[in-house]
Amino acid sequence: MKARALQFPTRYQEDVALAQDIANRDTVEMVVTGRPIEAQTKYATTLQDKFNEMIVKSTMAAPDQFDTVFDTMMNDYMSNGGQAILDERTALYKELNG
C-alpha cells in the first residue's frame, strides 16, 4: 500500500493510502458458479457495445440532460439482454444460496 502512495506527489500520498486501504477492505466477494450464464454468452457483444455507447453519451451529455440520456441508455441496455442476464444471475444465485 505504501509503495502505491509513494508513486503520487507528496500532497496526495495520504489520500491515496487511505483510498487504497478502503478499497482493500470494502470489497464484494466474487460469485463463482459451476456453469456459465447463458444470457451473458448470448448478449455479451451487443451489451459491451451498448455499455461503451452509454459511457460516451452520458459523459458528453449536457448536465441538464444527463439523467435523461443515462436513463434512456440504461433502458436500452436492459431491454437488449441486460435484464435477461440479471434474471438468470439472480435465479442462479438463489438456487446456490437458498
Image (cartoon, helix red, strand yellow):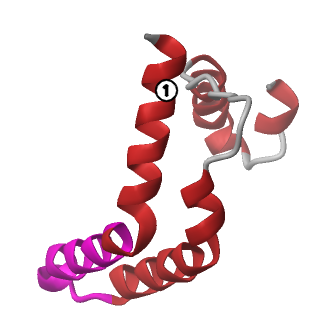
Establish if 26 lies above or below 97: below
Q: Is residue 46 left or right of residue 8?
A: left
Establish if 98 lies above or below 19: above
Q: Which residues are magenta?
A: 61-78
Establish if 60 lies above or below 51: below
Q: Pointer 1: what residue? A: 93
Instruction: Characterize the local packing of mark 1: few (<14), some (14-19) or many (20 or more) Cα atoms within 10 angstroms.
Output: some
- Residue furthest to the top in view is 98
- Residue furthest to the right in view is 3
Q: Residue at x 31, y 72 (%)?
A: 79
**Which of 93/77 is in front?**
93
Q: Is residue 6 left or right of residue 59?
A: right
Quadrant in the rendering for residue 59: bottom left
* Residue 51 on the magenta span: no
Q: Residue at x 64, y 37 (%)?
A: 16
Quadrant in the rendering for residue 96: top right
**Which of 34/30 is in front?**
34
